[in-house]
Amino acid sequence: EARLHMFLFENYNKHLRPVVNKSRALTVRLGLTLHQIASLVEKSQFLQTSLWVRQMWRNEYLTWDPKEFGGISTINVNVDKVWVPDIYLYNNADADGDGALNKFGTQIKLLFNGINIWLAPVLLTSSCKIDVTYFPFDEQHCSLKFGSWTYDGERLDLVSESPSGDVSKYVPSGQWDLVSFTAKRNEIFYVCCPQSYPDVTFTLNIRRKTIFYYMNLIMPCFLITGLTLLSFFLPPESGERITLVITNLLAMTVFMLLVADWLPPTSEVVPLISMYYTLTMMEVGLALVATCLDYLKCYFMNPVTTEMPFLVRLLVLKWLAKLTRVKVP
């Protein structure tokens, strides 16, 4: 094996693109195995995923005949000894890293026919535009866009290993359901350069698990709405109706603050749950106003000499009485 290393690297230059014909593009195959969705932060709008990265290409300068070297057909070498493609995560959002896939510490596997296989685990942080219109019943589409930073399509052709990412080792998330993990190759012309730059974009489609939000946000709001309506069965003289309505209004304010804390501060869309909470708070506010008017009537109007207005009598004694099945004397 020592003799093989001497044979391969004695006159090898790792800075040269590993193709004999320099007019031909080098093909690099990229594959991802999704291990875990670490987090999706709605407020900062970034996705953190644990991945296993696979890169494969053919180095025409590193080939040998196994018969001449004791039948050795595979060796492992350090990454700093061979040429590696400069593949980057274009939509990187990690403040402590640049999203490079050429700085792993794992060794590269060399085959006798020149095939280089590089496997490495990585924790990537990528930007992801969050659509909170249907929160918490939303589905998010986050992409991981990989491509060479300096080699155009005429010198390096980046292709996907398969039409989709590998999810066989996926560890389920407690907050998200994995819908799909697809891959697509693109060729894009940028303003800087006349040549096209190929990239492979992996799209992660995930759906939020709603049981937690249903039990902690939706159901309490239903209960508060019901309590607000039931408060009108309390007699105004008892003084408990206004206390109940004010308590409901404060509770709705707390839940509204919780929702605002979980959602990103964007003005592009208005989440339906925010609209629902706003309408519920308006209902509780109107109930509070009606309760205050009830108190004013009880304390400042004489029920013997004061006649009920016609519209109020029609609304309360006819329509609402039938709706609530109350018998009017």
Image: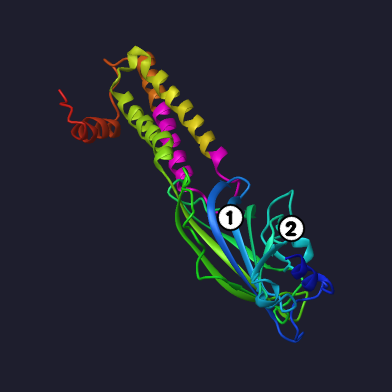
Taking the image as drawn, is residue 89 in sight? no
Residue occupying image coordinates x 66% and y 74%? 112
Which residue is more in the foreground, 70 or 267? 70
Q: Quadrant of residue 153?
A: bottom right
Q: Secondary structure at mark 2?
A: loop
Structural crowding at the residue carrying mark 2, measured as other residues with C-alpha within 10 Å and reported as few (<14), some (14–19) or many (≥20): few
Q: Position of residue 305 (x, y in %)?
A: 28, 16
Residue occupying image coordinates x 74% and y 58%? 103
Q: Secondary structure at mark 1?
A: strand
Residue occupying image coordinates x 45% and y 45%? 136
State how the image is colored: rainbow
Q: CA distance from mark 1 to mark 2?
A: 15 Å
Q: Quadrant of the N terminus?
A: bottom right
Q: Position of residue 293 (x, y in %)?
A: 39, 24
In the image, which residues are magenta? 260-289
**Which labelled disc corresponds to residue 103?**
2
Is residue 261 a member of the stretch shown in magenta? Answer: yes
Residue at the disc numbered 1: 51
Which residue is more in the foreground, 145 or 116? 116
Taking the image as shown, residue 178 lies to the left or right of residue 14, namely: left
Amino acid marked by disc 1: Leu
Q: Quadrant of the C terminus?
A: top left
Mark nearer the N terminus (1 vs 2)? 1
Q: Position of residue 154 (x, y in %)?
A: 72, 82
